[in-house]
Amino acid sequence: MSRMTLEDKILQTDQYYSGDFTTQDENGKVTAVDMQRFDALMQHNSVGSVQLRGMTAAQANVVQR
């Protein structure tokens, strides 16, 4: 923690939901992941967490990488 900047600490409180960067069907299943939208949200920063609700394991792996 002592090596983290104030900005790093604040960014650790950020939380994103899969609906922020995906297209979902009427049941909440993710049908497409928009990595350009994801990258725009992240702005090359670290975040606290990303909720991967509705995503398949393969889709989640793409986001985690």
Image: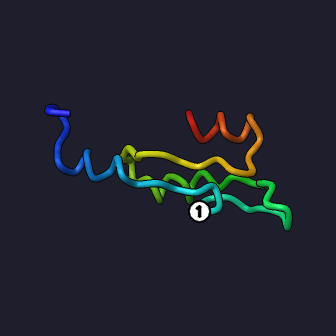
In depth, the one of 20 and 34 nearer the eye is: 20
Instruction: Provide residue 18's location: percent of width, then percent of height.
Output: 63, 55
Q: Label 1 is placed on what type of residue?
A: Asp
What residue did someone put label 1 on? Answer: 20
Q: Quadrant of the N terminus?
A: top left
Determine the image quadrant of residue 29: bottom right
Is disc 1 surrounded by few (<14), some (14 to 19) or many (20+) residues within 10 Å? some
Give the quarter of the figure containing the C terminus. Answer: top right
Tell me: 50 left or right of 12: right
Q: Dividing the picture into quarters, in which one does residue 5 lie?
A: top left
**Quadrant position of residue 23:** bottom right
Q: Residue at x 75, y 51 (%)?
A: 54
**Element marked by disc 1:** helix
Q: Residue furthest bottom?
A: 26
Image side of residue 2 versus residue 59, left or right:
left
Vertical arrangement, residue 51 with respect to residue 19, above or below: above
Depth check: 17 or 62 in front? 17
**Which residue is depicted at the point 48% across and 46% down?**
49
Task: Please state if 16 lies on the left or on the right of 27 as rendered.
Answer: left
Give the residue displayed 74% in from the left and 35% down from the top: 57
Residue 26 locus on image (x, y percent): 85, 67
Taking the view exactly as shown, the residue that stands out farthest to the right is 26
Q: Is residue 57 above or below residue 46?
A: above
